[in-house]
Every structure is written in C-alpha cells, then in structure tokens.
Amino acid sequence: MSTAHQRRSGPRRVGSRIRTAVVTAVVGALTAGGLVATAGTASAQSTLADAAEAQGRYFGAAVAAGRLGESDYTATLDREFNSVTAENSMKWESLQPSRGNFDFSTADRIAEHARSQGMDLRGHTLVWHSQLPGWVENLGTNDLRTAMNNHITTVMEHYQGQVGSWDVVNEAFQDGGSGARRDSVFQRRLGNSWIEEAFRTARSVDPNATLCYNDYNTDAWNSAKTQAVYDMVADFVSRGVPIDCVGFQAHFNSGNPVPENYHTTLQNFADLGVEVQITELDIAGSGESQAQQYGGVTQACLAVSACSGITVWGVTDKYSWRSEDTPLLFDGDYNAKPAYHAVLETLGGSGGGGGGGGDDGDAACTVSYEQTQRWGDRFNGRVTVRAGDAAIGSWSTTVTVHPPQEISATWNGDPSWDSSGDVMTMRSDSGGLPAGGQTSFGFTVMANGNWAAPTLGSCTAS
Ligand code: G2I
C-alpha cells in the first residue's frame, strides 16, 4: 500500500479498515458470465455495505436531500450503503450563492442523515467550473484567488471531522485528444497553478481529510485525458503537492463502455502512491449485460488494494440524472436489479436486495435455485419461493440466463421477458403463500455451450 495511503489517519468509520484490507482470491475466480446466485447463505453478507466492508471497502451512493423524506428511498439507502455523497448540495452554487453568504442548510440535512446512520460522507466538490454561481465568473485574478481559497476554507472547516474525502478539484481537463486543461474561469485567471493552490489550501485547513482530484473519461489507460491527469498527479506527488486520492467518476454507456484495461488504469494511479476511489459509478443498460459491466468494475476495484471504495451516482433509476438510461442498481420501484446482484456477489455477498419497495408492509419472501436435471444440450432448473413470517398475496422474482443460453420452457408460474430476452420475470400464477409456506417453479435452459447457472433476482412479495 502507498505511503500517502498509509499516512492518512482521518476519522472515517470505514476508511480506518481500508488500510488493513486484504483482497481475497475468490474474487479473481469469478468470471463475468459465471455469477451464481446462492440466495440465503447463512454466513455471507446480504447488503452492499456489509459485503464491501468485509472486503475493506466502502459502498456509497449519491443522495439528493429532497428525496430523504421518501421512505422507500431512505430505507434502501440506509440498508445498502455506508457512504454518502451529496449529489448537488455541496457544490459552490448551493453553498455560497452570493459572495460571503454561505448556506449549509440543505447539505447539512444530508450530513446529518449520514451521521445518524454511521455512514461516511464524501465531499463533492470544492472547485468546479460548473454549478458555479455567476458572481465567481466576474472576478478578477486576485479576487478570484481570494474567493477560491475562502470557499475551500469555509466549507472544509464547516465539515471538518465529518467529511473523510473531498473532491478538491473536479473536471479540470478537457475532453478529447488534446490532454489540455479545461478552459475555465480558474484556468484563465489563475493559470496552471490553480489546481495545486487549491490542494495546498485544502491540506492547510483539514490535514486529516483525504484530498482527491475527480474526473470522468479517465477510465481507458491510453486516452489522452487519462494520461494528462496521470502526469499531473505524478508531478504533484514528485513535488510534494498534497494530493491523496484520484476519483474516477465512471459514467459508462455504450459509447463509453467499461474499458478492458480499467484495472490497469486504477493500478497505475495507485502505483503513484495515491488512493483511488470510484466516485460516481453508473452504467447505462439493463439485464445481464449491465450486470456484467457492474461486476467488472467492482472486480477491478477489489483487485487494486488502494481502491478504497465505490459510490454509485444515485439510489434508484427513477431519480438518476439520466434516468432514461436506467443506469443504477435499483429500479424505480426499489427492486434490486441483476446489476445489484452482480455487485453483491462480486463483493462476496449473496441474497440481498431487501424486499423491494411499494406498499409491501412486512410481506417478504426468499428464493433459491437448484439444477434438477441435465442433458447433452440443456438443463432444468427449479426455483423455490419461500414466504417469510407473514403470509403473502403474490410473489415475483427474476431469472437471468447467460447468453447464448435460452429458456425454452417454463412451468408453475407466469413468465415475462425483458427486451434482451435474457431476463425472465416469474410471477405467481396461483395466488400467494401462507406464513413460512413454499412453492416452486421450473424452466428448461438450452445451454448453447454455456453451462453457467442462471442469476436469481431478489424475491418481491405483496
Ligand atoms: O453530470 C453528472 C455528474 C458528473 N460529474 C460531476 C457531478 O456533480 C455530476 O452530477 C450531476 C447531478 O447528478 C445532476 O443532478 O450534476 C448535474 C449538473 O451538472 C446535476 O444536474 C442539475 C441540473 O442541471 C439542474 O437543472 C438541477 O436544478 O441538477 C439540479 C438539481 O436537481
């Protein structure tokens, strides 16, 4: 582990365990197509937070203060995550909308929620060209320098002892092949030295905070932007500019998929002696392909000892900044998606997903899978559905097969398929179950050469 990494001694609940993290070999044994659901294993962790913590990592979510009053939102957040980032409320325009007038009220609601739940708090973000109030754009050089340092100082002092990691500077490099600095008001007025000045100020205010540079499209090792950020961090480290961490936003979609060499990128930065964090993860898509990419990102973090944790950029698809891409781990009804299970299982957990949202009250059920028969070209699977301590009126769960597998027959349930054809949702076709009762449904999978067991979603009861 790096020198910088060991030197940090912040107050973080999870962070203190990161430094003794041991990456278990079992992670390397998981192949993208071979994630197997083993619901209800007694010893495994069944939430993202617990499973990540067992790996010496945190697992966080971006949070919008306005959603904290929604019970399903808060229940999912509190159950699954042990770190919180304010999605918008700690940005400059929110905290200092006019010069010298700080308003911490909204951000404090998020901080207070995190504190009440014993969660880490990530600070996002001190200096960024976007969501910057208009008054900053109009300042001259000296005034801007004073305003930047004053903003960093006032905000960090306010959250001293609460925020473990700060995104001190966000998105200071251009997109595309130039590798140049972004043309921001900070760059124009203060020149190249503004980034290191921000870090030096931050260190002087809170010597215990982990100070991060945070950016997007820095995932592929060979891209010009990745190289430019790497060169800056290498330069900072060699000159003793106080930087502790690099944040990889990790916003992925079909045009910007998880690169093959993602792990190499994280490792190369870690080798500079900084912590790496995946700070804003979301991946457009659905079903098995989204799940595989989420599993791959999780695996990459686990394979790099200085990768201290992962934050997903929201709790539920319905409130994502790009909800049409359904990029998160929970759908709009707070049901755990295949991507959730891929992350949980890659972290060494199983089961999980809670009981879904909606008006389920105490209704709950669990599912487990077994293969019952196998032939030269196909196998039969059986899923057993069990009710919890209360009777349930109906149940549903998902079965995700791994391409080129195909489900050719089903029995004892009411199936429907997603557009990819890989995710089958099976619903009860003959009513519910008494408390503690069980039933099962079955299906035939044409293997087409792939004998991996299907991945089970969580069981939803009503
Ligand atoms: O764009 C995605 C993220 C890229 N990295 C930095 C992050 O800070 C950024 O987050 C997004 C938020 O998720 C959005 O919620 O930043 C956007 C602004 O650049 C946020 O969008 C803003 C809308 O633009 C505003 O109109 C809206 O009032 O969200 C505000 C609050 O809902």
Image (tube, helix red, strand yellow):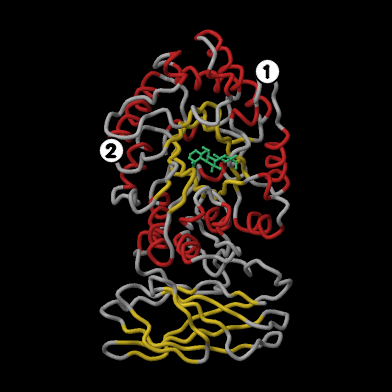
Give the amino acid type for the residue marked by disc 1 in the picture. Gly
- 314 over 36 or under it: above or below: above
Given residues 205 and 41, the one toward you in this image is 205
SS of the residue at dot 1?
loop
Mark 2 and mark 1 lie on one chain; the one further toward the N terminus is: 1
Dot 1 beta carbon under 8 Å from ligand 1: no
Q: Is the residue 285 above or below the residue 273 in the image?
A: below
**Residue 107 occupies which quadrant of the picture?**
top right
Q: Quadrant of ligand 1?
A: top right
Residue at image location 53% in from the left, 74% down from the top = 39
Amino acid at pointer 2: Ser
The answer to which image quadrant residue 111 occupies is: top right
Label ID, residue 100: 1
Identify residue for label 2: 223
**Based on the displayed image, in which of its 4 quarters is residue 451 positioned?**
bottom left
Sort mark 1 into few (<14), some (14-19) or many (20+) by Cα contacts within 10 Å. few
User: Which residue occupies 46% across, 34% down?
Assistant: 214
Image position of 176 (left or right of 11): left
Q: In the image, 332: left or right of 286?
A: right
Residue 38 location, x and y as percent? 49, 74
